[in-house]
Image (cartoon, helix red, strand yellow):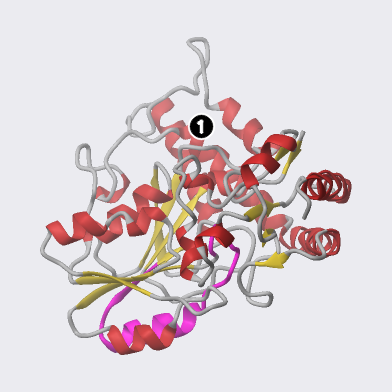
Amino acid sequence: MIYLDYQATTPLAPEAREAMLRWLGGPESDTFGNPHSPHRMGRMAAAAVETARERVAALLPEGGRLVFTSGATEAINAVILGTSGDVVTFATEHAAVLDCAEAVLAQGRRFTVLPVTPDGRADVDALAGHVTSSTGLVAVMAINNEIGVRNPLAPVVDIARQVGAKVLVDAVQAYGKVPVEVAADFIAISAHKVHGPKGIGALWVREGVVAHPLLHGGGQEGGLRSGTLSPALCAGFGAAAQVAQESFSEQMFHVEHLWNKARDAFVGWELNGSAVDRWHGNLNIRKDGLDVARLMSDCRQIMFSAGSACASGSGRPSHVLRAIGLTERQAKSSIRLGFGRYTTLADIDSAAAMINAAVREQGL
C-alpha cells in the first residue's frame, strides 16, 4: 500500500503513540485520572495536559492562549457562532466554515462568501470592497486542503482591521508544516493533520480577545470549552507538535524533494491552483476526460483522493475546483496526491507508474 492522502489525515507519529500509551492507564496504574480532579492522580493528568498545551502552542504566535477542542471543526464553529457581527469568508473555505452559514443567518447576521482569484487565492480586492463596520468576523484558511494554495493572510488581516473585524485563520493544513505567523484573533488547528491522534484539535485565542463558548457544562478550559479532557489525546498532540518543531527544516527539505519528483513524474497533467503560492505537500492535478472512479478502482493499492476527502462519496464536483473556474467535467477529472514525512521517493515513483499506466489504459 502507498499512502498519498496526507491532506485527509496523517500517519500517527511513533512519538505520539508512545506519549499516549502512558495515559491510557488500566486499573493497576495511576495514570487514568481525570485532569480536572484535585487529588494526586488528577494533578498528574493535569500536568500532562499542560505540558502538551505548551508544546502545541510553541508552533503558534506568542500573546495568546490555547484551548483544546475535539478538532478544528469544533474550534471553527465556536468562533463563527460565538462572535458578533456579519461573517465574511471565501468560496474555497472548508465545509466547517461554509456550512455555518445557515446557523449564522438564523442568528440574524449576514454570511457572505467572496470569490477567489483564478489561481485559488483569496480575492483581497473583493474583501476590501465588501467589508463594512457591520462586519464582525473574516474567516480565511492559511493553506487550502484541496489544492494546497496559500492565502495572502497579511492583507486579509489588514483589511479586516480597518473596519474593526476579527480574523479567524483555519491553519489545519499549515500547522507544523510552515510558520504560522499571522496577527489573527483566532487560529484553528487539528492534531491528526500533523501526525497526532484523531479526536483532538485546538483553538488559539489572541490575548485580550473575548470568546464565547460553544459547549457549556463544567467550565473547563477557562470556561471556553466544557468537557473532560483526554490526557492521552492531549499528550499525543503535544508529542506530535514537538516532533514537528524539532524536524521542521528537515521536513521542508524532504517535501521539496517529493514535490520535484512528483512534478517530473506527472508531466502532461494540468496543475490546479497556483504553481507558486502553495504548500508542496499537495499536488492537485487533472487530466481532461479522465474517469477518476475507474482510476481509483484500477489503483486500489494507492491511497489518494478525488477532490476533498471530507466530501468524498457525495457525487458533487469539488466546490474548490469550481470556484477557481474549472468546469464540472474538469473538476471531476482531478485527483489530489498528498505526501509528507513518511513518504519516500520510491513511493512517488511507484504510484506515478501505476497511475500513469492506468490513465493510458483509458486512452489518455
Residue drawn at the location 20% of the way across and 60% of the way down? 104
Residue 174 seen in this snapshot: no
Task: Please identify the residue farthest to the top as the structure is shown.
Answer: 28
Q: Residue at x 61, y 58 (%)?
A: 176
Relative horizontal placement of residue 136, taking residue 237 as reference (left or right): left
From where the camera sits, is residue 331 visible? yes
Q: Is residue 272 above or below residue 132?
A: above
| Dot 1 alpha-carbon crowd within 10 angstroms: few under 14, some 14 to 19, many 20 or more | many
Position of residue 298 measured from the top left corner of the image (x, y, whole percent): 74, 36
Give the residue type that dot 1 points to. Answer: Ala
Quarter of the figure with the N terminus: top right
The residue closer to the viewer here, 30 or 330, is 330
Look at mark 1 in the image and give the residue it sits on.
Answer: 232
Residue under the image location 20 percent in, 72 percent down: 86
In this rendering, would 101 be left or right of 13? left
Q: Is residue 231 left or right of residue 217?
A: right
Q: Secondary structure at mark 1?
A: helix
Vertical placement of 84 versus 200: above or below? below
Image quadrant of residue 314? top left
In the rendered image, the residue lying farthest to the front is 363
Is 312 situated above or below 89? above
| Residue 205 locus on image (x, y percent) | 36, 63
Q: How far across and how far down the image is residue 201, in percent? A: 45, 47
Across and down, in percent, residue 124 comes to 43, 84
Residue 178 as seen in the image, left or right of residue 126 = right
Quadrant where the image shows the C terminus = bottom right
Against 234, residue 78 (above or below) is below
* Residue 99 among those drawn in magenta: no
Q: Which residues are magenta?
A: 144-168
